[in-house]
Every structure is written in C-alpha cells, then in structure tokens.
Amino acid sequence: MIKYRLACDKGHEFDAWFKCSAAFEVQRDNGHLACAHCASKKIDRAIMAPALARNRGTLINAEDEKKRKAVNELIERVERDFDYVGDKFADEARKTHYGESAKRDIYGEATFDEAVDLLSEGVPVLPLPKPARKKD
Ligand SMILES: [Zn+2]
C-alpha cells in the first residue's frame, strides 16, 4: 500500500491509500476518485510543498565504475580522517572557522538552511553525495 497526497481542481488536499501507483491511475481515470471536501472528480497527486522538496539531499549517478570508486574513497577518507560531530555540525563548523576552537576537519548533519547560512558566511562546507557512516 502507498499513501498519496491528492488534490482536486479546486485545491483541496487529502490523503488516500492505494495498492500501487497503477491502481491510483486506474481509479482516477475511471472516475472512482472524488474530492473528500467538494466531491470533484478532477483529482491528481498534489505537488510536493516546496518546504519538503528543499529537504532533499543532493544525489549523483556515477555509471562509470572508476568514478564511483573515487566517490566511495572520498567518503571513506572523510569517515577515517574527519571528526564526526553529529547534528552539532553547524555550530562546530562555525567555531572552527572563526577560531573559537582548534582547526580540525569535521563532518556531520545539517539542514539545508544551516548549510546555506554557513556558505553565506564564507564557511567552506560541502555536501557529501551519500550519508557517511555515523560514528558513536
Ligand atoms: Zn475539492
């Protein structure tokens, strides 16, 4: 079962469960779906809110095995040589950058907004193409 957020042509949104994406299309095309608020039959999947879309991470697709290896080596190197700071990344990156704590290489998690703030302050942060392993 998959849950879809649906919207009618008048902009009402509601959630509905379907066996699969094809089942949703069949029910919609046969006019078996109606808006929970106004009974309109012009239903489609709701566009994801921008706030949700902004939380998506960056992905790369390396078909070339050598390039894929290079990416994995980079991640391994980060995991081996950088200090893991978890969700305190933004604070720690700032402290390091402004000299409030000793210079060191760190990695950890940050939100999109935190990353934008850091970059606009000139703190050199980079996204990793996939989440690195978390250290305790
Ligand atoms: Zn409606």
Image: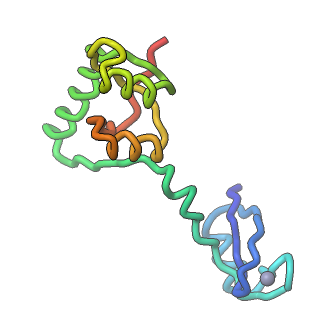
34 displayed left or right of 27:
right
Question: Image quadrant of ligand 1?
Answer: bottom right
**Quarter holding residue 50:** bottom right
Report the quarter where the N terminus lies: bottom right
The tally of labels here is 0
Question: Residue 68 appears in which quarter of the rendering?
Answer: top left
Left or right of 16 in this view: 88: left
Please state the horizontal and vertical placement of residue 24, each as a whole percent of the image.
67, 72
Q: Note whether 27 is above or below 49 in the view shown.
A: below
Q: Is residue 110 above or below residue 23?
A: above
Which residue corresponds to the image point at 37% horizontal and 37% vertical from the top-left? 130
Residue 96 as seen in the image, left or right of residue 87: left
Residue 44, position in %: x, y? 65, 78
Pick the front one: 108 or 19: 108
Q: Nearer the viewer, residue 120 or 48?
A: 120
Relative vertical location of residue 25 with respect to residue 97 in this rendering, above or below? below
Residue 18 at x, y percent in the picture: 72, 64
State the residue at coordinates (70%, 72%). 6
In this view, the residue farthest toward the left is 66
From the viewer's perspective, is residue 31 above or below residue 17? below
